[in-house]
Amino acid sequence: MLFWHDQFERCRCLACRFQRRHCHPFAPKFVNVTVDFHVDQRKLFMTPTCWICGAALDAGGYEPLVRVVCRNCGQRNLLQRTFDHFVPVETLGAGGMGTVYKARDTQLERFVALKLLRKDVSSEADHDAQLQQEARIAASVNHPNVVQIFSLGMDHGQFYVVMELIDHGSLDDLMESQGRLTEHQVLDIGIQIARGLRAAHRKGLIHRDVKPANILFVDEQAAKIGDFGLAAFATQQSQHTESDRVVWGTPPYVAPERLCNQPEDVRSDIYSLGATLFHAVAGKPPIDSNTNSATELCELKQHPAELRSIAPDVSSPTARVLQRMIAPDPKQRAPFYDDLLAELDAARRALEIADARRHSSRWPFSGLFRHH
């Protein structure tokens, strides 16, 4: 449903579109108007109008948060499209599946992340009960390292997913600003994301799209994996295009199984996480190619780069576990997340021991000067 919004006139009512003094007589004060009242009032104003001259605006087919020029007076008006009781207020990003908005939940009065799937993907989701079921299972995953899904639905012909709002950036952002990450950072992030993936896998889910852009930060240390349950829609869509076999996903992080048309399982996500961590610590992915051809990528993935040939300062234990994660043959990777977490923990402990030894070798007599 479309409604008018003037972002500069904060005193104006978002529901009835008029200034406070023009609101319904039963709601003389804007601050006292309940959400339920506004939802009812909004139904009376289906056609958005120009806030300067009052002329009706042509808003058909527009995406949320677009500015429409009034044909009568030339004023640019900001239009918003509500999805049930969620009101987009800011565009956070766009990808191959759709667009993510910061949105206001008018029932619980909080901000959330609202992901709108493209209309072609939404059409697939609307008719595929299995895909909807997977999204609902993803919404049931409650773990500190998984972005929480609050609800999902269909409105205006678009499938939407409402998620926890994480606004401290992604691993992709961190890699762009910092360049190479430290070994400690990479191992800490890897352990957290592996825990989140393990929690989802215990409910029978695989992610299918682990990559830096889907690893989000709550603060400087806590990381979460996002977009769970959504990749199923895009994977289903990609199966309809068999002619050129253009792969769905981000090429450096996609597991060879998908490229080579083989079954995917938990080890496919392990590969994608390994390729992500490899890129973060080395500064470049194990497969550096611009092609999006599944056939070409399938061949390239059989010969991944050696981490220590790109980043010789990375410790042997870390290089060993990451190299195993991106092994071309799934049988060579860790079979379960418990095994992977044990390997990542061991690499982190080895790194801490090595750091402690380096510190003690620099100050061999430091212990003599401790105060008792």
Image (spheres, rainbow, N blue to C red):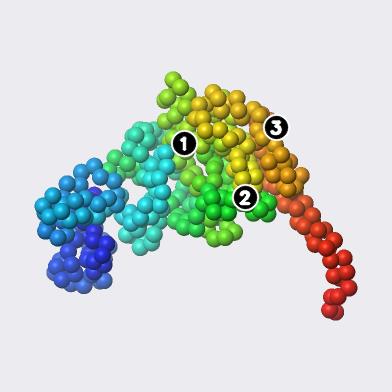
Q: Say which amino acid is labelled 1.
A: Ala
Q: Residue at x 19, y 61 (%)?
A: 17
Q: Say which amino acid is labelled 2.
A: Arg
Name the residue carrying label 2. Answer: 180
Q: Where's the C terminus, which quadrant?
A: bottom right
So how many labels did they put on this image? Answer: 3
Image: 306 above or below 19: above
How many residues crowd around disc 3 within 10 Å: few (fewer than 14), some, or many (20 or more)? few
Q: Earlier in the sequence, mark 1 or mark 3?
A: 1
In the visual, does 83 lie left or right of 270?
left
Q: Earlier in the sequence, mark 3 or mark 2?
A: 2
Labels 2, 1: front one: 2
Q: Can residue 195 be seen from the camera position used here?
A: no
Front residue of this view, candidates 256 and 142? 256
Q: Position of residue 118 (x, y in %)?
A: 35, 39
Q: Under tag 1, what secondary structure?
A: helix
Q: Residue at x 17, y 64 (%)?
A: 18
In the visual, does 299 lie left or right of 112?
right
Distance CA(mark 3)–CA(mark 2): 27 Å
Name the residue carrying label 3. Answer: 332
Distance CA(mark 2)–CA(mark 1): 31 Å
Labels 1, 3: front one: 3
Labels 3, 2: front one: 2
Q: Under tag 2, what secondary structure?
A: loop
How many residues crowd around disc 1 within 10 Å: few (fewer than 14), some, or many (20 or more)? many
Name the residue carrying label 1. Answer: 232
